[in-house]
């Protein structure tokens, strides 16, 4: 290689290294958009070879009290404070215990909880509105990660932007998304609303034929009467 | 001698794509990423360039512009707001279904979204089933902070087009309705026929090769032998189909077109597995090159197909199938570029073993040494026996004649193969566990192989390797280590 070629080669290498240094400087200066994020490592294993991982405890280990939300077939659904490191059975105990119709096989009472968890205890399916299929054990759905209250949703016709269904404005399809509410009951709610005006409290739903105390308690954590 | 940019221009686009996704993963400000990766591409280009050709500057400008645009596009794709959830009532078709550890998962398609449904092993939903589901729709979550399981489930499902998970209160199967997708119907029909007609282990091999469905038991055995790639639809399978069609139609004028049609039909039937799509794009480029009498560089085809897949679905970058497919085929193509002699072809097995060690050991914990020996025989043996087994399976499924005899014959072939694998793995029962230094060495070997295949001078290779190794602490967590 002649002197010109050598000079050119050296120039290219120097230019290349300068480009790398400039890129490194930009990364250094502008990195940290998500400073606390841990490395998210590698790609996933092939389907079928994945070992199911248990729901891990999240939240700050130094927290001594967690806030959890329990719904479904328990005596007193609602929001509770429990000790950190608790499991599902601790939350159930806090909510007054399981109702007789709770699906004891479909839930894992030993599952670990985390701060902000939403636990839904399913009931054993009996009535004709329920699936004829075997129910999921809710292994992964026993503990439901909470969503931030301000979450909004795309305009998917079947998914509703708020976790709580406003029974004063919800249409039939929105009402049918509630557990135990089918098209007939949904229509009854709408007719009742048209006839008697707004629901002033959730408990008023008991006046709808087809909604008993049990069903009311089941849907209570999922509905509101609006502002 | 051609310059790297004129021979493998797609590499610089691929480099820009990969760099963009790593920087995104590292939380770099989004608007900076396209500029940074363009600088990285330019830096790489300058360091490996020995001499220039006429119009070199124009090619460089075009490649850098494409790198910038590719990066910009990728970042806009991955930086989408997280899907939100809520109470939901929707009707959806089961488009895929598989085992998931001790459970099962179904992928549902409601016409606009793909939704994940996890269920117990006793809930069997078939692809094509229509379900009406009432439940709580939730976004897929990142792994909890501080938990390094080596597996990011959210990104795994993102790579499969799934963005949300449904926690069902109620599932109603619409028995009077079925899905509209012909492919799904075909796959379901074929799977039922295979499940009902073929005995194990023949069934597992045919399910894997025809439909990309993995039999967990067979998968475990192949993991021990280091031959899991035989059960994943890969470039090997796609190449085999293309090869068979080529042999049948080699005298036919429009053979490239016929091969393309059959190849994509096969890829469609297998459910568009990442490795199969990568191989399909690569082979398609070769076929297009044949049509226009302009043979393409295999290295360029690999890089182009890998970059194109990232454009289509950026989340493939975090998919093990995509990574294994790209790294192993880069190793194979680079090896044959450097050592075209048939006498050293047996050495490709250890080369691929080294190239894939970081990914496999990081994900599964260990890599068996037996795989090095078994894979020397595996590809030629399977290239021979897989078409025979497929023919046998066709005869058995159609129940034309001598089904019992055909079953005995095909089972003997499969069991003979497995017997041989068991002997080798009992002679070499050792495994290499995950180790950061060994993984770094393996990555270095792969990169050196690739750079040498691009005819980069040794001193320039050393400069690139030095820079890359200095970046390991930064790359940690995004690539393989």
Image (tube, coloured by chain):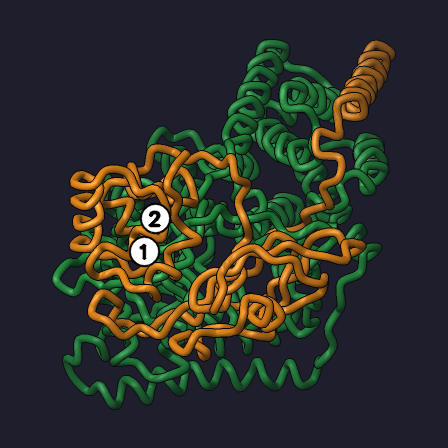
Q: Residue at x 51, y 24 (%)?
A: B73
Circle number at residue B173: none
Q: Residue at x 60, y 45 (%)?
A: B330
Name the residue that disc number 1 marks: B134
Neighbor class of circle 2 (other Cα within 10 Å; few <14, some 14-19, many 20+) is: many
Name the residue that disc number 2 marks: B88
Return the x and y of residue A116 as percentages of the image width and height.
61, 52
Return the x and y of residue B373 as percentages of the image width and height.
65, 72
Q: Residue furthest left?
A: B176
Are labels 1 and 2 on one chain? yes
**Whether residue B462 is situated above or below residue B129 in the rendered picture:** above
- On screen, residue A166 versus residue B224, left or right, reads left
Q: Do tag 1 and tag 2 residues touch (Cβ < 8 Å)?
A: yes
**Whether residue B33 is situated above or below residue B173 in the rendered picture:** above
- On screen, residue B477 versus residue B458, left or right, reads left
**Whether residue A44 is situated above or below residue B2 in the rendered picture:** below
Neighbor class of circle 1 (other Cα within 10 Å; few <14, some 14-19, many 20+) is: many
Give the mark nearest the N terminus, 1 or 2.
Answer: 2
Chain B rendered in what hue?
Answer: green
Which secondary structure, mark 1? Answer: strand
Question: In the rendered view of the protein, which quadrant contains the C terminus of chain A?
Answer: top left
Chain A rendered in what hue?
Answer: orange
Return the x and y of residue B303 as percentages of the image width and height.
55, 36
């Amino acid at each position: 290689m002649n002197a010109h070629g050598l000079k050119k080669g050296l120039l290219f290498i120097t230019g290349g290294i300068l480009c790398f240094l400039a890129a490194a400087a930009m990364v250094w200066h502008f990195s940290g958009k998500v400073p606390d994020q841990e490395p998210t490592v590698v790609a996933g294993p092939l389907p079928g070879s994945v070992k199911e991982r248990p729901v891990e405890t999240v939240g700050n280990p130094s927290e001594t009290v967690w806030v959890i939300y329990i719904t479904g077939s328990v005596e007193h659904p609602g929001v509770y404070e429990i000790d950190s490191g608790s499991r599902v059975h601790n939350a159930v105990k806090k909510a007054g215990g399981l109702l007789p119709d709770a699906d004891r096989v479909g839930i894992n009472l030993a599952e670990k909880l985390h701060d902000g968890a939403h636990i839904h205890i399913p009931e054993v399916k009996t009535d004709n509105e329920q699936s004829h299929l075997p129910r999921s054990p809710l292994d992964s759905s026993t503990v439901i990660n909470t969503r931030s209250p301000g979450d909004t949703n795309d305009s998917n016709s079947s998914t509703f932007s708020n976790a709580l269904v406003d029974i004063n404005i919800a249409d039939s399809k929105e009402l049918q998304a509630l557990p135990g509410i089918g098209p007939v009951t949904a229509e009854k709610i709408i007719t009742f609303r048209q006839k008697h005006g707004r629901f002033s409290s959730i408990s008023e739903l008991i006046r709808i034929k087809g909604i008993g105390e049990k069903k009311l308690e089941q849907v209570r954590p999922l509905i509101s009467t609006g502002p | 001698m051609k310059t790297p940019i004129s021979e493998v221009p797609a590499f610089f686009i691929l480099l820009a794509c990969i760099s963009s996704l790593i920087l995104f993963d590292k939380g770099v400000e989004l608007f900076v990423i396209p500029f940074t990766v363009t600088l990285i591409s330019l830096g790489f280009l300058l360091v490996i360039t020995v001499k220039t050709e006429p119009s070199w500057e124009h090619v460089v400008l075009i490649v850098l512009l494409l790198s910038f645009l590719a990066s910009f596009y990728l970042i806009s794709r991955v930086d989408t707001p997280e899907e939100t959830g809520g109470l939901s009532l929707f009707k959806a078709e089961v488009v895929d279904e598989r085992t998931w550890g001790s459970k099962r998962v179904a992928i549902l398609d409601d016409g606009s979204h793909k939704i994940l449904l996890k269920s117990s092993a006793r809930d069997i939903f078939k692809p094509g089933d229509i379900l009406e589901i009432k439940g709580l729709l939730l976004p897929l979550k990142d792994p909890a902070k501080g938990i390094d399981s080596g597996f990011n489930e959210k990104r795994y499902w993102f790579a499969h087009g799934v963005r949300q998970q449904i926690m069902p209160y109620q599932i109603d199967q619409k028995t009077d309705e079925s899905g509209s997708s012909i492919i799904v119907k075909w796959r379901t029909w074929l799977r039922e026929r295979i499940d009902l007609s073929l005995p194990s282990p023949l069934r597992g091999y045919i399910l894997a090769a025809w439909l990309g469905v993995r039999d967990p038991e067979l998968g475990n055995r192949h993991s021990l032998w280091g031959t899991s790639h035989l059960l994943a639809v890969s470039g090997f399978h796609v190449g085999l189909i293309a090869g068979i069609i080529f042999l049948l139609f080699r005298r036919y004028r429009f053979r490239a077109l016929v091969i393309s049609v059959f190849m994509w039909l096969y890829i469609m039937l297998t459910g568009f597995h990442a490795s199969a799509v990568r191989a399909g794009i690569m082979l398609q480029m070769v076929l297009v090159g044949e049509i226009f009498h302009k043979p393409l560089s295999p290295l360029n085809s690999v890089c182009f197909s890998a970059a194109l897949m990232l454009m289509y679905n950026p989340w493939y970058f975090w998919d093990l199938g995509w990574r294994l497919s790209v790294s192993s085929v880069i190793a194979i193509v680079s090896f044959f570029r450097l050592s075209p002699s048939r006498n050293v072809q047996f050495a490709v097995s250890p080369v691929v073993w080294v190239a894939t060690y970081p990914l496999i050991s990081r994900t599964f914990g260990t890599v068996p040494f037996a795989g090095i020996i078994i894979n020397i025989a595996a590809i030629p043996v399977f290239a021979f026996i897989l078409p025979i087994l497929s023919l046998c399976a066709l005869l058995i499924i159609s129940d034309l004649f001598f089904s019992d005899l055909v079953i005995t014959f095909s089972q003997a072939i499969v069991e003979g193969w497995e017997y041989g694998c068991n002997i080798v793995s009992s002679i070499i029962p050792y495994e290499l566990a995950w180790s950061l230094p060994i993984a770094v060495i393996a990555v270095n070997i792969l990169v050196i192989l690739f750079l040498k295949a691009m005819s980069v001078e040794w001193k320039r290779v050393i400069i690139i390797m030095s820079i890359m190794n200095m970046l390991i602490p930064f790359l940690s967590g995004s690539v393989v280590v």
